[in-house]
Amino acid sequence: MGLKLNDIRKSFGTPPVNVLKGISFEIKDGEFVALTGRSGSGKSTLLYVLSSLDPPTSGSLKVDGREMESLAPSDLHQFRNLHMGFVFQFHYLLPELTCLENILMPARKTGRQVELQKDALKLMRDFEVEHVKDKVPGKISGGERQRVAIARALLLKPKYLFADEPTGNLDSASGEKVMKIFEQVNRKHKTTVIMVTHDMGYANRAKRRIGLKDGAVEFDRKSKDR
Ligand SMILES: Nc1ncnc2c1ncn2[C@@H]1O[C@H](COP(=O)(O)OP(=O)(O)OP(=O)(O)O)[C@@H](O)[C@H]1O
Ligand SMILES: [Mg+2]
């Protein structure tokens, strides 16, 4: 079980520009992986492919043994909604909804909003954002917004959490809170975390670091067991 990539390639445009140049690796359940590399090395592109938000040009992506390419779009959508959480560098909270309503968005699709309200509030408490529950995202700080976005990503207890520079726009205190949350969900809930970061301090806290260079894997290192 987990994610398995085999010779993933991705190109954009005509003539095609090859952005991912044959990437193969496996991520097992419960891993905490930091994806690093210079700007333009293909980190975000790879994260989108890994999370099946964007199909590769060629190659295979298996999630829990399923070939993602072979799923019907509606099944793929449902699989993602139930099992994958996403956190982007620039949060995509809906501006007209309150923070609590934003966190409950994934539950809306499955008709479990009422049932999950308690869980949403518990996440807000854990992430120290309960005080902003009735505010709209435009009226709270960047760090608070990011923690609301993470709470939303975690509401349905996804097996996988994908994050693209989740600490990128935050001051060090807010960044540290986000990192702690990721470490905690990985440890307590065994959530598989895949996080793009250019912050070496955070990357070094991951159990495994995969470095990209020009669209290929430059290194793949595991930390020694602590
Ligand atoms: N939709 C697209 N169309 C054309 N080119 C793209 C597209 N998306 C990405 N690229 C190109 O692919 C390369 C890798 O982009 P990507 O966003 O994956 O890099 P990155 O490692 O995430 O960089 P950063 O650290 O700056 O976020 C870049 O040269 C980028 O211009
Ligand atoms: Mg990027």
Image (cartoon, rainbow, N blue to C red):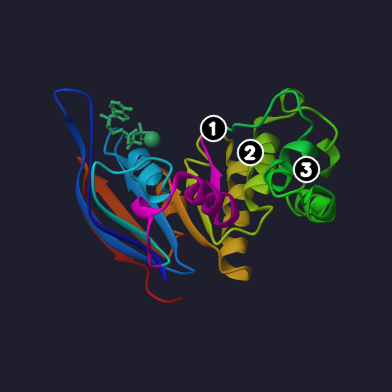
Is residue 69 inside the magenta stretch? Answer: yes
Closer to the eye: label 2 or 1: 2
How many other residues sit within 10 Å of disc 1, few (<14), some (14-19) or many (≥20)?
A: some
In this view of the protein, which residue sits in the foreground, 187 or 104?
A: 104
In this image, 109 relative to 115: left or right? left
Q: Is residue 63 above or below residue 198?
A: below
Disc 3 to disc 1, C-alpha distance: 18 Å
Q: In what quadrant of the picture does the N terminus appear?
A: bottom left
Taking 161 as reference, is 91 above or below it?
Answer: above
Q: With 171 as the anchor, is 65 left or right in this view?
A: left
- Relative to 208, say whether 139 is above or below: above
**Residue 146, numbered label:** 2
Give residue 4's quadrant in the image: bottom left
In this view, the residue in front, 208 or 101, is: 101
Does the magenta segment cover residue 186?
A: no
Q: Nearer the viewer, residue 83 or 209?
A: 83
> Which badge, 2 or 1, comes first in the chain's sequence?
2
Q: Of the residues under marks 2 and 3, which one precedes in the sequence?
A: 3
- Residue 107 appears left or right of 86: right
Element type where label 2 sits in the image: helix
Mark 3 falls on what kind of element?
Answer: loop
Q: Is residue 183 above or below residue 58?
A: below
Q: Which mark is residue 169?
A: 1
Q: Earlier in the sequence, mark 3 or mark 1?
A: 3
Region in magenta: 65-89
Q: Do callouts 2 and 1 mark residues in contact (Cβ within 8 Å)?
A: yes
Read off the residue under disc 3.
129
In screen coordinates, is 94 left or right of 67?
right
Q: Amino acid at mark 1?
A: Asn
Alpha carbon of mark 2 to alpha carbon of mark 3: how far? 10 Å
Which residue sits at x=56%, y=69%? Answer: 190
